[in-house]
Image (cartoon, coloured by chain):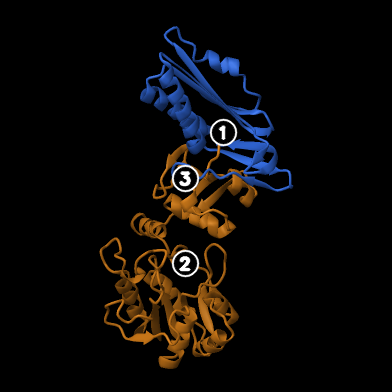
Amino acid sequence: MFQLTSSPIDTEAVRKQVLDPAAGGFCSFEGWVRNQHEGRPVLKLEYEAYAALAIKEGERILAESIQRFGILHAACVHRTGPLEIGEMAVYVCVSSAHRDAAFDACRYIIDEVKSRVPVWKKEFFADGNAGWVRCDHCAGHQ
Amino acid sequence: MNAIILAGGESKRMGRNKALIERPDGSRQIDYIAGLARECCEGVFLSLWDENSITIELPVIPDLHPGDGPITALESAASSCGGPLLVLGCDLFLMDRETLAFLISHRDPSRKAICFRNRIDGRAEPLCAIYETAGLELAASALADGNRCARKFLESLDPVMLDLPHPAALDNANTPADLSECFAKITEGVTSKSVRILYFAKLREARGLDEETIETLACTAAGLYEELCFRHRLPLGTETLRVAINGEFSDWGARIAANDEVVFIPPVAGG
């Protein structure tokens, strides 16, 4: 299940979505707010989403990961709104019979989410400037 | 009255000579415009900087200063055929005889020029206008003053300004996407429709709004974005955007229907 939330991510609740007696492996990824961007000190971030399409595209990515890697379950939650340094911006987790597929699927999901889901990130820098981060690897934006 | 068709542009963004583009009915654009001009003018001339670029049975008025834009074509015409002169851009894919008849019927020889207001920003449209001799004669001094903008030159003539009887008649095409939009208007007709636009991230800040409902004549998503860009000078071009219609990714040639919800998606950056 792909979700957007404006509250801190409850990783335990998301992890429960992928529990399965047939699973022998679990893999997760947490994306955190970093205090700098290419050496420039960052004070905070703000995420904005086109929710209707973000959820649809996120669900498509999760379905693709199951199909492609033969994993059992996949889930992802992305934050919206203002985030402080160190907060979790995105959480991905998958369960699978074997570990290789779990690692690969987890990696696939975070890469695709970053480049395809209509979520935007604004960085507020210590020098007072702010700007929208441009993802240079976006699908369809090359 | 004489007419001059301006076909000297480089058509860089189109990637091919606009005058030679084939219209939906198979005719060449230059022949279409020349046909309209012949119906209402005695002499029809062609302004070109490369005489070999187009094959058509029309007398050519070579540019005195090739590559300097439309005003130099007016300057060249002033010394060869004089006014009154109907000036037509060769890329007016939606031009029609009623629009030209309307322009000609409102002509006032005591003024320096007559033209239409742009349907969106209301400013003078220089490439479908009649320039009287007194107006044409000022082209040389405008060029000498360094003016290369045909619109500013026309505005300096204090022209008679008309509202377009057919609002989309002056829609032109500078890119393949513009051309698809023009062809959609030709084949599917021009109707005003109300659409809801949602803005996000950089576009939301540039527009200063989360959403708005607007009236548009656009048929395609690209045509709609072009209208919005023209109105609001939005900072991103279609090459960096994606488009979604009614909550689903779509393509730039997709048709817009009344009450659609359209989102232009800036480069995303989640995670």
Which chain is orange in the picture?
Answer: B
Quick one: which residue is furthest to the bottom in this view? B79
Q: Which residue is identified by label 2?
A: B165
On the same chain: label 2 and label 3?
Answer: yes
Q: Is B11 situated above or below B250?
A: below
For the residue pair A79 and B117, the one nearer the viewer reads as A79
The percent position of residue B107, horizontal first and vertical second, equals 49, 81
The percent position of residue B13, horizontal first and vertical second, equals 42, 64
Helix, strand or loop at mark 1 = loop
Q: Is B133 situated above or below A82?
A: below
Lower sequence index among marks 2 and 3: 2
Helix, strand or loop at mark 3 = strand
Q: Which residue is identified by label 3?
A: B243
Q: Chain A is drawn in which colour?
A: blue
- Please rate how many residues cluster around mark 1, counting C-alpha atoms within 10 Å: few if below 14, some from 14 to 19, many from 20: many
Q: Which residue is identified by label 1?
A: B271
- Which mark, residue B12? none
For the residue pair B270 and B56, the one nearer the viewer reads as B270
The percent position of residue B57, horizontal first and vertical second, equals 26, 82
- Please rate how many residues cluster around mark 2, counting C-alpha atoms within 10 Å: few if below 14, some from 14 to 19, many from 20: few
Q: Is residue B193 shown left or right of residue B180?
A: right
Quarter of the C terminus of chain B within the rendering:
top right
